[in-house]
């Protein structure tokens, strides 16, 4: 399968031990400091199977929101609170409605692979021609490609990959282009 290197939809694919939230957070901060408006959600706190204290930071406001539900000491399984995730998603949707240059989604996780979670934000961003980057664990990349119908570029979990992707979309200096670029993804919408 080949990908469009100028696609507005990017998957930052990470392996266990890599920190996509740090990479995405630094990228968003740099874009915002250059006059762009990055909005979205980044995971804060534990990673992997340990979700106690799981929270997220809204990229556009810096606000931290809890995503953890305490199911008691004997509970097993995911402790992500789907209603809190949807509430955070609603805040991101409001920010998108106010205008954005980039949407960042913290994970293509279990909720999203089941057709739930923050998938509606992806649809909103693509409908509004807002580029999007999402952190995708390598073991869920096949499910991501199925969801994205192959219309996604795969990026390594490193800042350089994000900078190159963004540079191809918006010029090497991160300035907004005088003439908007139309990618293959946009043309096929």
Image: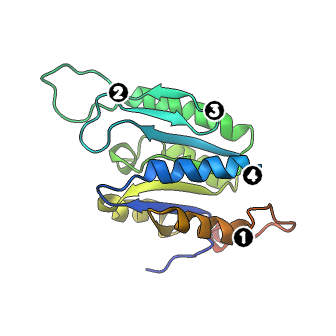
Find residue 68 and name its label: 2
Q: How many other residues sit within 10 Å of disc 4, few (<14), some (14-19) or many (≥20)?
A: few
Q: Is residue 167 left or right of residue 136?
A: right
Going from the N terminus, do you reach mark 1 or mark 3 first?
Answer: 3
Q: CA distance from mark 1 to mark 2?
A: 39 Å
Q: CA distance from mark 4 to mark 3?
A: 16 Å
Q: Secondary structure at mark 4?
A: loop
User: Looking at the picture, does residue 71 appear above or below residue 14?
Assistant: above
In what quadrant of the picture does the C terminus appear? bottom right
Task: Look at mark 1 in the image and give the residue it sits on.
Answer: 172
Going from the N terminus, do you reach mark 4 or mark 3 first?
Answer: 4
Q: CA distance from mark 2 to mark 4?
A: 33 Å
Give the farthest residue toward the left: 74
**Residue 51, percent from left and from top:** 29, 34
Going from the N terminus, do you reach mark 1 or mark 2 first?
Answer: 2
User: Looking at the picture, does residue 175 appear above or below residue 114?
Assistant: below
Task: Look at mark 4 in the image and give the residue it sits on.
Answer: 34
Q: CA distance from mark 2 to mark 3?
A: 20 Å
**Residue 43, percent from left and from top:** 44, 40
Q: Nearer the viewer, mark 2 or mark 4?
A: 4
Of residue 93 and residue 21, the one placed in the foreground of this image is: 21
Query: Residue at 63% across / 72% down in the picture?
Result: 6
Query: Residue at 53% across / 68% down in the picture?
Result: 161
Q: CA distance from mark 1 to mark 4?
A: 13 Å
Are the two marked residues, 2 and 4, in contact with CB atoms closer than 8 angstroms?
A: no
Find residue 61 and name its label: 3
Are the two marked residues, 2 and 3, in contact with CB atoms closer than 8 angstroms?
A: no
């Amino acid at each position: 399968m080949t990908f469009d290197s100028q696609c507005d939809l990017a998957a930052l694919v990470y392996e266990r031990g890599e920190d996509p939230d740090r990479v995405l957070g630094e990228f968003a901060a740099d874009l915002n400091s250059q006059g762009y408006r990055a909005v979205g959600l980044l995971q804060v706190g534990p990673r992997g199977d340990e979700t106690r204290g799981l929270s997220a930071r809204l990229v556009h406001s810096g606000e931290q929101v809890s995503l953890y539900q305490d199911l008691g000491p004997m509970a097993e399984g995911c402790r992500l609170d789907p209603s809190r995730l949807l509430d955070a998603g609603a805040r991101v949707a409001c920010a998108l409605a106010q205008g954005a240059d980039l949407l960042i989604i913290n994970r293509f996780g279990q909720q999203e692979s089941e057709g739930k979670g923050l998938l509606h934000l992806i649809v909103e961003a693509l409908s509004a021609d807002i580029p999007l980057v999402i952190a995708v664990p390598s073991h869920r990349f096949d499910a991501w490609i199925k969801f994205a119908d192959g219309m996604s570029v795969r990026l390594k979990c490193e800042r350089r990959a994000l900078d190159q992707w963004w540079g191809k979309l918006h010029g090497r200096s991160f300035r907004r282009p005088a003439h908007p670029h139309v990618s293959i993804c946009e043309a096929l919408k």
